[in-house]
Image (cartoon, coloured by chain):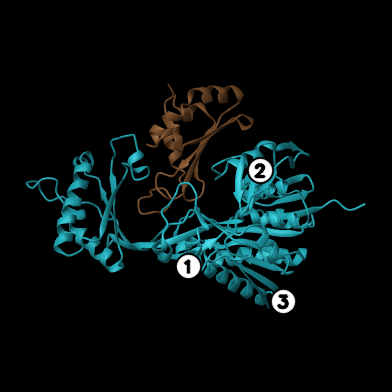
Amino acid sequence: MTNKPSAKVLVPAGALGIPYDHAALDAGLLEIPDLIAIDGGSTDSGPFYLGTGTSKYSRSATKTDWAKLMAARAKAGVPLIIGSAGTSGADSAVDWMLELTIEIAKERKENLRIATLKSGQNKSVIIKALDKGLITPLNPELPLDKKTIKDTTNIVALAGVEQIQAALDTGADIVIAGRTTDTALMAALPISKGCHKGGAWHGAKIAECGALATTNPNSGVILMSFDDKGFTITPMAPDATATPETVSAHMLYENVNPYILYEPGGYLDVEDAKYWPVDEKSVRVEGSIWKTTTPYCVKLEGARFVGFQTVSIVLVRDQHYCQHIDDWKSALRASFEKKAKISGLSDVSLELRVIGQNATLGDLENRQSASVEFGVMAIFTSNDQLRSQEAAKLLNPDLLHLPLTKHEPMPTFAFPFSPPEMNKGALYEFCLNHTMAIDNPMDCFTLEIHEI
Amino acid sequence: MNLGQKVRKIRSKNAGPFWLTIDIFCHDKSNFQNIKRRLNTHAIAQLFQIDVPQILRFDIEALNVIKLSFPRPHIQGNAHDTDMHGASYATLVEELLLD
């Protein structure tokens, strides 16, 4: 009689850098997991992090949290894996995470085998794939040509279970993966061990945000037990409970479709999944289906440089100006356009957003209210930081003093800072929403071993 | 009463950089059936100034949730985007008055 396949994955938190219950992590280690897995990023903080390949979280906080997980790994004697390292999972972010890991290992006097799985894409390879018709747009369709690809600062492909499995198969103590789907990170090991594929992918989706699928999201730590039929989720904190509702509701979270999840090499269908309580803490899920699709496709993410921005802020408290804020905004724009033309700065674009009016919802705002005060945020964008700053300085006297009519005494508005303008640095934008077909899952990923 | 006052919670969130998804959590089965019947997808399309076919709507009976997904008003983080995480769009739906 053969043993039934099984795998236990301990997930400390929804992402490295998010607080979790440390006692719950210790409790999780006692359950003898096969792997400790944590997500390191996503696109949710915006295109800057992929554009620059830098981390959203501070180096010191990341190091502190990662050191705790490395200590937990050593205690449990099982591999530790992080995916989408350094927020974006770009190659430079993987290098940053590797550097931190080596630094911590030296401080802990640990010898380790570390695998890095890089997801960064060579632009010329992507251009060739585009020429060969291997790149397919997703909805909403973004225009894609060679120039767009050349303009990107980073392109990553999202790894699936095959690439994560290859990294785990190296026998590494720690795997630092670049961009991966959140789910592949947790699904790879159970699938390697022969667990139910639908259950593995579904459990992975539920686990990717840690204890968000429980009654106490801030506790972080959950244990995922996979087997030949499905999975069981058990939160590790004493004050956290998983219920069929908290678990199934997690399929709504940041998902376009609550039933179907597209992944490298196929998709997960949970429409017929059944959820039931096992005991007071745990929920059992079975009935999820994995469908393999061909050709094998990976999703691409890319960010390109758009320009450098400078932002000025002025506060308007005068009630007459508050009542005529749209007129004042138009007057500012007209004055800027005139001055920019004279100064040869017409290439600098100006966007004026009125805080207190519609700065949050823009054109979709459908309410109007009399406001005590307004903030006017002037955003200058050009391909040169100094030109954006120069344009902001050009508008400075108007932001401070522009009158609505010629014959009124000169008004003075409130600058909260000196100077009122701030150089915001580079603006990036996401410019790829595409998949790429590849022959072999490892074709566009790089696996390296580092013995330290 | 507006929609936000009739249900348990309304949440909006990015579903990747290109999509917005709105989850309307109803109190119970009868509240769900009532809201499901009265919430016209057309009203949501009007709020977001898009066409009805752009909206994917899921009436999820098992969770008493109505889910609406559609392309973001602006791609996340581009020069014109005003809300990086897309969470404030829920207020528009909360303030919707049902017929």
SS class, disc 1? helix
Which residue in the protein does label 1 denote?
A123
SS class, disc 2? loop
* Amino acid type for the residue under numbered disc 1: Lys
Task: Tell me what residue is drawn at x 60 percent, y 26 percent.
Answer: B28
**Mark 3 surroundings within 10 Å by alpha-carbon count, few (fewer than 14), some (14 through 19), many (20 or more):** few
- Quadrant, the N terminus of chain B: top left
Q: Earlier in the sequence, mark 2 or mark 3?
A: 3
* Amino acid type for the residue under numbered disc 2: Thr
Quadrant in which residue A159 is drawn:
bottom right
**Mark 2 surroundings within 10 Å by alpha-carbon count, few (fewer than 14), some (14 through 19), many (20 or more):** many
Query: Residues at marks 1 and 3, common chain?
Result: yes
Q: Earlier in the sequence, mark 1 or mark 3?
A: 3
**Mark 1 surroundings within 10 Å by alpha-carbon count, few (fewer than 14), some (14 through 19), many (20 or more):** some
Query: What label sits on residue A111 in the rendered view?
Result: 3
| CB within 8 Å, label 2 to label 3 | no
Which of these two is toward me, A365 or A128? A128
Can you see residue A375?
Answer: yes
Chain letter of disc 3 in the image: A
Task: Tell me what residue is drawn at x 20 percent, y 58 percent.
Answer: A395
Q: Earlier in the sequence, mark 1 or mark 2?
A: 1
Task: Tell me what residue is drawn at x 59 percent, y 74 percent.
Answer: A99
Which residue in the protein does label 2 denote?
A214
Chain in brown colour = B
Q: In the displayed structure, would residue A163 be above or below residue A249?
A: below
Residue B84: image x %, image y %?
44, 50
Which of these two is toward me, A396 or A185? A185
Chain in cyan colour = A
Cα separation, mark 1 vs mark 2, equals: 42 Å
Pair 1/2: label in front: 1
Can you see residue A11?
Answer: no
Residue A384: image x %, image y %?
30, 67
